[in-house]
Amino acid sequence: MGWQSLQNGDLLERAQTAVFAAIITTDQNLRYQQNLTGRPAIVVLMTTSWPVIRPAAERVVAAVARLAVDAYIEIDFA
């Protein structure tokens, strides 16, 4: 979508304007840096390692399927 250069606040605003239901990120500090009220639901993956995330992709999909509006959840892969 050409959003790779957007920073957190701008990215959240663009996602909200585009009516995204959820954002999946590995930014564990997002909730401390941004006001998430009224934003799409946020799913934070507690690792940036694709080899760790990939085998657990169905857990991520299941978490997204259960999200409520304005939800914030963290998925740990330990």
Image (spheres, rainbow, N blue to C red):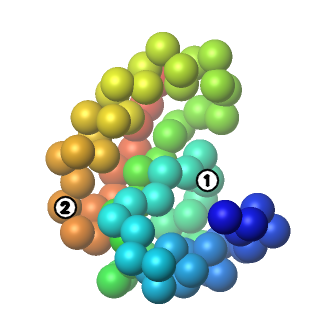
Where 61 sits versus 59, above or below?
Answer: below
Mark nearer the N terminus (1 vs 2): 1
Q: Position of residue 7 (x, y in %)?
A: 73, 73
- Residue underneath mark 1: 27
**The residue tagged with tag 2: helix, strand or loop?**
loop
**The residue tagged with tag 1: helix, strand or loop?**
loop
Image quarter of residue 56: top left
User: Callout 1: 10 Å neighbours few (<14), some, many (20+)?
Assistant: some
Where 41 sits versus 46, above or below?
Answer: below
User: Which residue corresponds to the image point at 36% horizontal and 82% vertical from the top-left?
Assistant: 37
Residue 74, which numbered label?
A: none
Residue kind at label 2, given as amino acid type? Ala
59 sits left or right of 47 in the view:
left
Disc 1 and disc 2: Cα gap in Å? 20 Å
Residue kind at label 1, given as amino acid type? Asp
Residue sitting nearer the eye, 21 or 52? 21
Residue 34 visible, this orientation: no
Q: Position of residue 46 (x, y in %)?
A: 53, 37
Q: Residue furthest right?
A: 5
User: Which residue corresponds to the image point at 47% horizontal and 85% vertical from the top-left?
Assistant: 17
Image quarter of residue 19: bottom left
User: Callout 2: 10 Å neighbours few (<14), some, many (20+)?
Assistant: few
11 sits left or right of 7 in the view:
left
User: Which residue corresponds to the image point at 53% horizontal and 20% vertical from the top-left?
Assistant: 54
Q: Position of residue 9 (x, y in %)?
A: 62, 80
Residue 52 visible, this orientation: yes
Q: For the N terminus, which image quadrant?
A: bottom right
Where 42 sits versus 18, above or below?
Answer: above
74 sits left or right of 3 in the view:
left
In contact (CB < 8 Å): disc 1 and disc 2:
no
User: Which residue corresponds to the image point at 54% horizontal and 69% vertical from the top-left?
Assistant: 32
- Residue underneath mark 2: 68
